[in-house]
């Protein structure tokens, strides 16, 4: 999965140390359950009394846990506690967060309680933080709506989300809060923000004013699950992030603040700049054809430019861009074959990331490396060698052209001249100039390849994982002083979703719930950022489906819609699909029609949890928000299978990925909850690993287990009623089909015929898949 590192500001000095520490079980348990005063947790010790929040209610013990008594005074009988926190300045003041019942307050050490949640949204509270000096100031973190703050002990609450990307489109994990005990106005929050159906952006944010305003502080890996976060009491400038028995330490210096948060999407160009390109667009029947002019896909756009890197006093670089400067005297040709490297001596010591270098490896695939060769043809944003990468892609200098070196006492120029991308006729000419002073430049005369990586890397892997920065060299320069371990732009060729939508709306009405976008077959690369297809949420106004209410990814206006647009489907390039829309081709169960149904279904599915004996369980769904492999979904396109109970402790899957299940249809607003039969989740025996909840749907598989019967009522107990409810919910949906063609091309007849057939059959499939309860129109004009 492509990880964007866009939001670490210049001047933020942060040092990360990853310690693979074996945290002993007693210490780990104490950190998880016996919480420090002011922080929230499930178990709280105040004096000789213990309080514990559990799925069965709130309990207290006065004999160190030998016996427990339920606390009920002032609490709703149905309340499910989630987190406790005591005020450091008043040990009798305790706050209790709950699931969907808001927050309660006790002024007598937990003996009696009163509701204190006026202004809080009806959602689960996952984290609590009490001010160390003022018991009336409390922060809560919710699972969908971010942070809230009270200054009057819970009498009233206000959002504390300015600068944070909330609400969240769906649940990832409850935000983790931490406070500097010596400077309580300095707060940190760790959040995971859904970008689209297959990508979560995990980052640390910092507030210097008690939560009034937040700024992005550090990017974190999206494949690490963080359990908790604390400020180191001995060194309050050190954050400790706990992840699976390891501690990740992030040190926050008091340096200058970030230059400002960089938006998740690249800055949008004004519609006037697109007028000429938009004039070439046209509608082929019910297909809108858009022509890329360099704004619709993230392809290489530095041709005719020079990037200049100038050493800064901090050990980093100032980076600027200018019109092309190019040394025409190429010098001596190197004997460099495909995927090979050649080491050359430099006539001076070249300072690079704090160390003088007198030798450099020239790698065929468009890079320079220090300390060893780096012949890899596939680019990477994490490298164990210090590198300068003018254009890292699969190049073959043995096929045509060559790589040249010209050296003087003051500068060395290394030029790739007319070097083709391997196996193609795409020619590329670019140059790197290293100067004795430590300055260096990258110049691009001709670049035919659309994709590749341009950037610099310090060779320290761990620092690059956490603190590198992805930029747009065309838009973000100049950068005054970047001390980061890596600065790069990955020209990955993916669609720029907002730009595509804005181009579409220049010539089309705002009449669509979703935009469905395909790339032309002639595009040589995938146009998604990792997954084969994805759904990007834009707006949600439906309660009870496990999604936040609000706008996401900038909202409809960022996509050019005045308010109607709900989502954007990136369906990848058309050549990936078979000609027959009903042909199974993906994961052995998905046809093009079923795949369209899955991505469309993500508008409402599958985000819900259910009440499992008082515990809020996410066992119905996978982390990718598809139904569990073990869920009986009557062959939903959203995952799971159509299971039959053989009556002998085994279950067999009969169908997969064919329709929207009754549960799906309830969440889509097409059925009443009274009309949804119970269903079951197979619970495999301990130790069964032949299939996992995240396994893809599969026909003809036999699994052992016991059925857990589930009803829609259990989902409603967690998520609330779906509103708007059936039959008031919409049953007619509109989508626009869009085809994006590369620069300099136009749509082929074969592509238009293929896509139009898919579009027409998709309308029929959707009606059948919903049992005739809904219709979908793909006409460009109503």
Image (tube, rainbow, N blue to C red):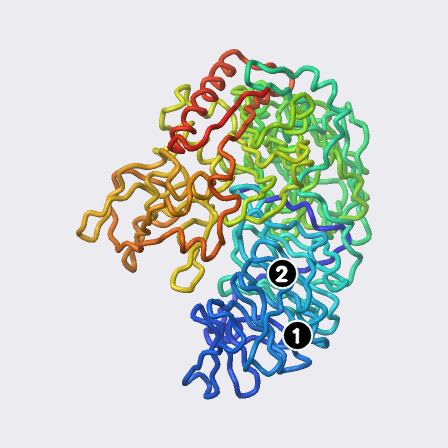
Quarter of the figure with residue 463: bottom right
Q: Determine which of the numbered discs, if any, sits on residue 164 in the image.
A: none
Please tell me whether residue 696 is drawn above or below residue 732 in the rendered image. below
Q: Can see residue 294?
A: yes
Label 2 crowd bin: few (<14), some (14–19), many (20+), radius 10 Å: many
Q: Is residue 328 left or right of residue 372?
A: right
Instruction: Give coordinates of residue 210: x percent, y percent.
Output: 74, 64
Q: Which is more foreground, mark 2 or mark 1? A: 2
Q: Going 18% across and 50% down the picture, which residue do you hit?
A: 647
Please tell me whether residue 757 is drawn above or below residue 532 in the rendered image. above
Q: Which residue is mark 1?
A: 233
The answer to whether marks 2 and 1 mark residues whose Cβ atoms lie closer than 8 Å is no
Q: Which residue is mark 2?
A: 120
Q: Nearer the viewer, residue 31 or 752?
A: 752
Kind of element beneath mark 2: loop
Q: Is residue 564 left or right of residue 696?
A: right
Q: Going 81% across and 31% down the picture, which residue do you hit?
A: 322
């Amino acid at each position: 999965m492509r990880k964007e590192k866009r939001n670490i500001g210049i001047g933020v000095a942060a040092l990360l140390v990853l310690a693979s520490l074996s945290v002993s079980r007693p210490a780990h348990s104490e950190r998880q359950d016996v919480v420090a005063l002011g922080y929230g947790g499930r178990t709280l010790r105040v004096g000789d009394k213990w309080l514990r929040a559990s799925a069965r209610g709130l309990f207290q013990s006065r004999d160190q846990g030998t016996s427990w008594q339920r606390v009920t005074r002032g609490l709703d009988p149905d309340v499910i506690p989630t987190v406790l926190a005591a005020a450091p300045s008043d040990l009798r003041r305790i706050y209790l967060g709950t699931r969907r019942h808001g927050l309660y307050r006790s002024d007598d050490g937990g003996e009696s309680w009163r509701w204190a949640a006026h202004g809080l949204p009806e959602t689960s509270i996952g984290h609590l933080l009490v001010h160390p000096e003022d018991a009336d100031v409390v922060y809560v973190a919710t699972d969908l709506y971010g942070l809230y703050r009270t200054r009057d002990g819970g009498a009233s609450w206000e959002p504390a989300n300015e600068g944070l990307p909330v609400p969240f489109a769906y649940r990832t994990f409850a935000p983790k809060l931490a406070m500097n005990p010596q400077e309580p106005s300095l707060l940190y929050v760790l959040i995971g923000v859904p970008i689209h159906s297959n990508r979560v952006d995990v980052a640390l944010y910092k507030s210097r004013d008690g939560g009034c305003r937040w700024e992005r502080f550090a990017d974190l890996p999206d494949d690490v699950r963080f359990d908790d976060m604390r400020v180191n009491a001995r060194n309050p400038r050190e954050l400790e992030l706990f992840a699976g028995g390891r501690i990740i330490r992030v040190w926050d210096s008091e340096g200058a603040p970030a230059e400002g948060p960089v938006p998740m999407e690249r800055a949008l160009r004004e519609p006037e700049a697109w007028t000429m390109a938009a004039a070439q667009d046209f509608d082929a029947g019910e297909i809108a054809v858009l022509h890329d002019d360099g704004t619709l896909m993230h392809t290489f756009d530095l041709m005719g430019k020079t990037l200049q890197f100038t050493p800064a006093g901090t050990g980093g670089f100032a980076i600027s861009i200018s019109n092309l400067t190019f040394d025409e005297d190429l010098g001596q040709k190197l004997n460099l074959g495909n995927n090979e490297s050649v080491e050359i001596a430099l006539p001076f010591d070249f300072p690079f990331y704090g160390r003088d270098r007198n030798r450099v490896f020239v790698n065929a695939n468009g890079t320079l490396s220090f300390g060893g060769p780096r012949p890899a043809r596939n680019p990477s944003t994490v490298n164990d060698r210090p590198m300068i990468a003018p254009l890292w892609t699969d190049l073959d200098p043995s096929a045509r052209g060559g790589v040249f070196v010209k050296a003087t006492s003051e500068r060395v120029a290394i030029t790739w001249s007319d070097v083709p991308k391997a196996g193609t006729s795409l020619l590329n000419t670019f140059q790197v100039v290293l100067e004795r002073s430590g300055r260096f430049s990258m110049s691009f005369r001709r670049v035919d390849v659309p994709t590749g990586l341009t950037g610099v890397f310090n060779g320290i892997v761990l620092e690059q994982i956490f603190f590198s920065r992805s930029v747009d060299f065309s838009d973000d320069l100049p950068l005054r002083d970047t001390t980061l371990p890596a600065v790069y732009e990955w020209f990955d060729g993916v669609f720029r979703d907002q730009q595509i939508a804005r181009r579409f709306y220049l010539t089309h009405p705002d009449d669509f719930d979703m935009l469905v976008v395909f790339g032309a077959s002639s595009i040589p690369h995938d146009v998604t950022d990792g997954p084969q297809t994805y759904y990007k949420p834009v707006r949600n106004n439906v309660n009870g489906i496990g999604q936040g209410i609000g706008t996401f990814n900038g909202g409809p206006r960022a996509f050019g819609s005045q308010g109607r647009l709900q989502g954007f489907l990136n369906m990848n390039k058309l050549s990936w699909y078979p000609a027959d829309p009903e042909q199974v081709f993906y994961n052995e169960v998905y046809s093009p029609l079923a795949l369209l149904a899955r991505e469309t279904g993500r508008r409402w599915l599958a985000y819900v949890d259910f009440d499992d004996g008082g515990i809020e369980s996410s066992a119905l769904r996978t982390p990718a928000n598809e139904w569990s492999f073990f869920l009986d979904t009557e062959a939903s396109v959203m995952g799971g299978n159509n299971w039959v109970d053989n009556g002998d402790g085994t279950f067999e899957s009969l169908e997969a990925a064919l329709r929207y299940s009754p549960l799906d249809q309830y969440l889509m607003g097409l059925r009443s909850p009274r009309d949804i039969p119970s269903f079951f989740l197979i619970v495999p025996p301990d130790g069964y690993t032949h299939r996992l909840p995240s396994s893809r749907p599969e026909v003809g598989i036999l699994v052992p287990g016991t059925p857990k019967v589930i009803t829609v009522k259990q989902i409603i107990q967690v998520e609330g009623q779906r509103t708007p409810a059936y039959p008031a919910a919409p049953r007619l949906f509109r989508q626009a089909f869009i085809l994006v063609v590369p620069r300099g091309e136009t749509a082929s007849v074969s592509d238009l015929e293929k896509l139009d057939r898919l579009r027409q059959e998709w309308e029929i499939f959707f009606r059948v898949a919903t049992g005739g309860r809904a219709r979908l129109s793909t006409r460009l004009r109503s």
